[in-house]
Amino acid sequence: MDSNETLMARELFHQIMQTRRSLHAGLADVLDDAPRCHFDMLHRLYTIIRRSGRDGAVSVSELTCRMYDSPQAVSRALRILEKDGLIQRTADPEDRRKTIVRLTEEGCRAHERCEQAVTAYAFAVARRLSPDTLRSFTQDLVLFAQAVEEENEARRAGKDD
C-alpha cells in the first residue's frame, strides 16, 4: 500500500469512528426518554427472532452464534433484559437442555417505542442530504459493508489455516 492509500485508509477509519461517536451521542439523546430500553441488544434480539426464531423465540445458543458477541456478553445482556422485564427465558419444551428467549409484551412495546424514535432520528439525518447523495451513499455503504465482511471472512479463514 503506497502512502496515499495509507492516508486514505486512515482517513476512512477516522471518519467512520467519528461518525460512530456522533451517531451514538445522537441516539443516546433520542432514547433519553426511554430509560432502560437497551435498544441495541433489544433490537438485535428482535431481529434475530424475526429472521431465524420459531414461534417468537430463539435459543440462547442460536442467539450467541448470531450476535457476534462473546457468550459472556450475551449472557450478561440477557440478564439485564430479563431483570428489566423485557425478555423471558424458559426451557425449550422440545429439548429441556436448551434455553429459549422471547420478548415480553413490555419488551415488544419498548422495542417499538425505541424503533420509532430511532427511525425519526434517521429520517431527520437523511433529510439533511440530497436524494442523490443519500442514494449514492447508501449504495456505497452497502459495498463497503460487503468489503468489510469479505475481509473479516478472509481473516477468519487465515486463522483456520
Image: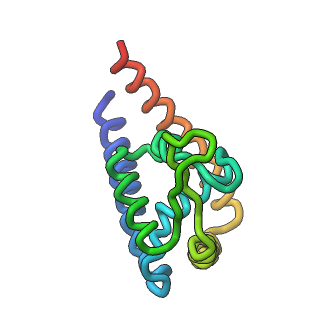
Of all residues shown, which one is farthest toward the top? 161
Q: Is residue 111 above or below residue 157?
A: below
- Tell me which corner region of the image, top left, top right, bottom left or bottom right, holds residue 80: bottom left
The quadrant of the rendering that contains the C terminus is top left
Residue 3 position in % (x across, y down) = 28, 34
Residue at horizontal 53 percent and vertical 63 percent from the top: 88
The quadrant of the rendering that contains the N terminus is top left
| Residue 119 visible in rendering | no
Residue 127 position in % (x across, y down) = 64, 74
- Tell me which corner region of the image, top left, top right, bottom left or bottom right, holds residue 121: bottom right
Residue at horizontal 37 percent and vertical 17 percent from the top: 160
Q: Is residue 67 left or right of residue 113?
A: left
| Residue 154 visible in rendering | yes
Q: Is residue 141 left or right of residue 1?
A: right
Residue at horizontal 40 percent and vertical 52 percent from the top: 74
The colour style of the image is rainbow
Q: Is residue 12 above or below residue 134?
A: above
Residue 76 position in % (x across, y down) = 34, 58
Of all residues shown, which one is farthest toward the left? 3
Residue at horizontal 36 percent and vertical 42 percent from the top: 9
Residue 157 position in % (x across, y down) = 42, 20
Q: Is residue 8 left or right of residue 113?
A: left
Q: 98 or 10, which is in the foreground?
A: 98
Q: Is residue 84 left or right of residue 125?
A: left
